[in-house]
Amino acid sequence: MNYEFDEILSTIKMTEIEHFDIRTVTLGISLLDCYDRNLDVAKQKVYDKIYKYGKNHVKYAKEVEDRYGISIANKRISITPISIPFAGLNRYEFIEMAKVLDKVAEDIGIDYLAGFSALVQKGFTNGDRELIEAIPIALSQTKRLCSSINIGTTKAGINMDAVNKVADLVKKTAELTKEQDSIGCAKFVVFMNAVEDNPFVAGAFHGVSEPEVVLNVGISGPGVVLDAIKSAGNVDLQTLSDVIKKTIFKITRAGELIGREVAEKHGIPFGIVDVSLAPTPAEGDSIADILKAMGVEDVGAPGTTAALAMLNDAVKKAGMMASNSVGGLSGAFIPVSEDQGMIAAVQKGNLSLEKLEAMTSVCSVGLDMIAIPGDTPASTIAGIIADEAAIGMVNDKTTAVRLIPAWGKKVGDVVDYGGLLGLAPIMEVRTISSQGFVSRGGKIPAPKRSLTN
């Protein structure tokens, strides 16, 4: 891939003025060869392998940062979903393994390590059940570890037994981390149609079809898109879409350049560039501000979903033109706590949980970093997860839920985690019950569109 000099100058401008950064370079590592009947031996194998491949990850990323003057916000590692190579562990042994993973992440100096995960869309292995029981304790006793569960696919339908277990898991995690405003829930996400090469936490994991080790990159750049839209002025929507696509094209090219440079330093394959607009709490780095610049008065106004659909489509089209290696989630993220414009819209009463759900039908990925009252029943959480999973199932897209039932908090309160996780106002949740529906358990069958052979 060739990079013209004017592209480089343009990227430097984006970096200095428009908050552009590379959100993450994520090193994916297979743990399929690390099982051993002796738990102590297995833990040492896991530590040694992650350390072997990851010990220079931060160093290499910083060298590339210095070379190009483009910030890489996060350096992360993802691993094989832990329940697969270690299906024979019990919940207490999984907790021990979690501490090993957290220790090696700390020793390497990365921000997060993800993949304390299971794939249960068609049912549970014994190891899956044990892992699910271990997750709340593991997240309460670690700092850098992230976890996820995939509860359905368009091909398999929705495993409602798993949905109910995950809802209980979220409630337990909230309680066990209540002294930190239930922060454990910010490190856990439940997926529908999870992908194997997602570089973003909390849902990253290294899929079983991935190579032994690979480097994936997740880009960002809401501020760059916002500036481009403002500069375009009062143009029609088709022209505006072209403006967005041209901007995303440059962002994608820069992101892939950075990712390939880091992979080359590691001496490993480059995987994918995830073309996602990922906001931060910083002023001017907001998806909500983009939607307002497109013309809606505030997020939540009529037209918001249409504007988001147009934005997401432009992101995907430009990414595919710019790179042959687009993957991951690739779209616009709408987390509440990580986007100052979303936070403001919630606090003004302009943005509801129901409107957010509608918006997730056209964007990546789903209901993300949403704080709800701590006394929200597990059955209601299960209903929210099921609704979001249904959107992913019927539309054959990845959707996710990362809810924080903040212990002891109610509507009007906030949780403030600082940094990238930001500040989340407690959102109102309807109190009418979904208990009778979710308690039936079993599976929601796959839709007609699953029969694509």
Image (cartoon, rainbow, N blue to C red):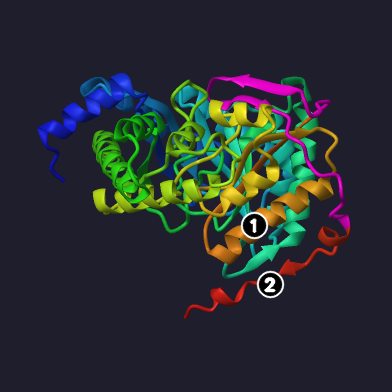
x, y percent for residue 49: 44, 38
Q: Earlier in the sequence, mark 1 or mark 2?
A: 1
Label 1, secondary structure: give it.
helix
* Label 1 to label 2: alpha-carbon separation: 12 Å
Comparing 406 with 150, the one in front is 406
Q: Is residue 173 left or right of residue 335?
A: right
Disc 1 designates what residue?
A: 389
Residue 445: give its label: 2
Asked if the magenta segment contains residue 324, the reply would be no
The amino acid pointed to by label 2 is Pro
Asked if the magenta segment contains residue 420, the reply would be yes
Please tell me which residue is depicted at 55% across the width and 43% down the height of the picture. Answer: 203
Q: Is residue 59 left or right of residue 13?
A: right
Residue numbers of the magenta segment: 407-435
The amino acid pointed to by label 1 is Ala
x, y percent for residue 71: 33, 23
